[in-house]
Amino acid sequence: MTVVRYEPAAGVRRVARDWNPPTEIREHAEGFVIELDVPGYARDDIKIKVHEGMLTVTGERKRPETDDKYYNYSERNYGEFSRSYNLPDHVDGETISAEYNHGVLTLHIGKKEAAKPHTIEIK
Amino acid sequence: MHCNEEVFTMLPELWRSKGLDFGPSVDDFVERFFYGWPGREKGGEVNWSPRVEVLEGEKNVTIDVELPGVDKKDIKVEVKDNTLTMSGERKRNEEYATAECCRSERLYGKFVRSFSLPDTVQADKIEAQFKNGVLSLVMPKNEKAMPKEITISVK
């Protein structure tokens, strides 16, 4: 079962997105782990929403205004990012948890009990 | 989507700042061209280049390097002959090492970046801080580089 990125309005209007943080999605027996590389953000700048089977992560970081300093050179991404994921049916939307450590946003999504691997005994 | 040669000579950020936006697939393609290619299923073990930002102030020069998911002990910062070299390795998260990888856009492996420091900074007084995946290197400027006011004496 693959979790695919879904951009709902890609064809209709431009989704607010200045850059795409690199993402890694992994599946294990208990659920999924989605990790986004978003270094240098404050916890409040990142928003995670779940709605009708779609998980959306958005964030915004503005270039800090500085009077006494100037940017000599910059490769960093500023602005908004937005990534959406279609949650498959066997995922439990209630069990989503998120943490932000070392510049990486980690989302844990649990699978429904019925979807976890079961061993069946032969009587 | 057809890219011509001219596009490849510009960094993605310069490209976007001029108002050109071809959408996520081409953006990602050009970014990989400059910053490294990941592998197919798993994150590729290649030499990658972390993004860097240089800020110059009156008293300090600050270099910010984006290193998300890198352990502090895997980063090495060295100064030699006015060249600042920052190197290290990004290792996979062992916690889910046995999990299957559905999709990865990340780069793992070794990284190196060097900077030539100008005479105006004191290379031996660098301070390094690592917060939220961003390594900040702050270097104070020399006395002679700071702006000084010269009073004109009238005789």
Image (cartoon, rainbow, N blue to C red):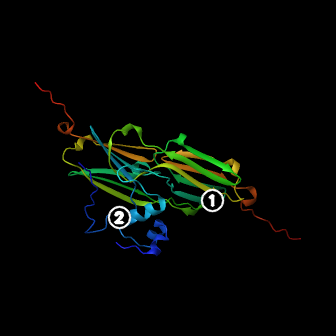
Q: In what quadrant of the picture does the N terminus of chain B appear? A: bottom left
Residue positioned 56% across, 63% down in the render: A73
Q: Which mark is residue B46?
A: none
The subunit carrying tag 1 is: B
Query: For this rendering, which residue is in front, B150 or B91?
Result: B91
Label 2 sits on a secondary structure element that is helix
Query: For this rendering, which residue is in front, A61 or B74?
Result: B74
Do tags 1 and 2 sit on the same chain?
Answer: yes
**In the picture provided, is B86 more to the left or to the right than A46?**
right
Q: Which mark is residue B25?
A: 2
Is residue B138 among what the camera can see? yes
Query: For this rendering, which residue is in front, A46 or B4?
Result: B4
Residue positioned 33% across, 41% down in the render: B99
Q: Amino acid at mark 1?
A: Gly
Question: Who comes first in sequence, dot 1 or dot 2?
Answer: 2
Specify few, some or many for label 2: CA neighbours under 10 Å numbering under 14, 14-19, or 20 or more.
few
Whole-percent x, y for residue B116 in the image: 65, 58
**Picture mark count:** 2
Asked where in the image residue A120 lies, by quadrant, the reply is top left
Whole-percent x, y for residue B125 in the image: 68, 48
Is residue A18 among what the camera can see? no
**In the picture provided, is B121 more to the left or to the right than B73?**
right
Disc 1/disc 2 C-alpha distance (Å): 37 Å
Residue named by callout 1: B57
Residue positioned 39% across, 47% down in the render: A105
Q: Amino acid at mark 2?
A: Ser
Label 1 sits on a secondary structure element that is loop
A123 is higher (above) or lower (below) than B33 = above
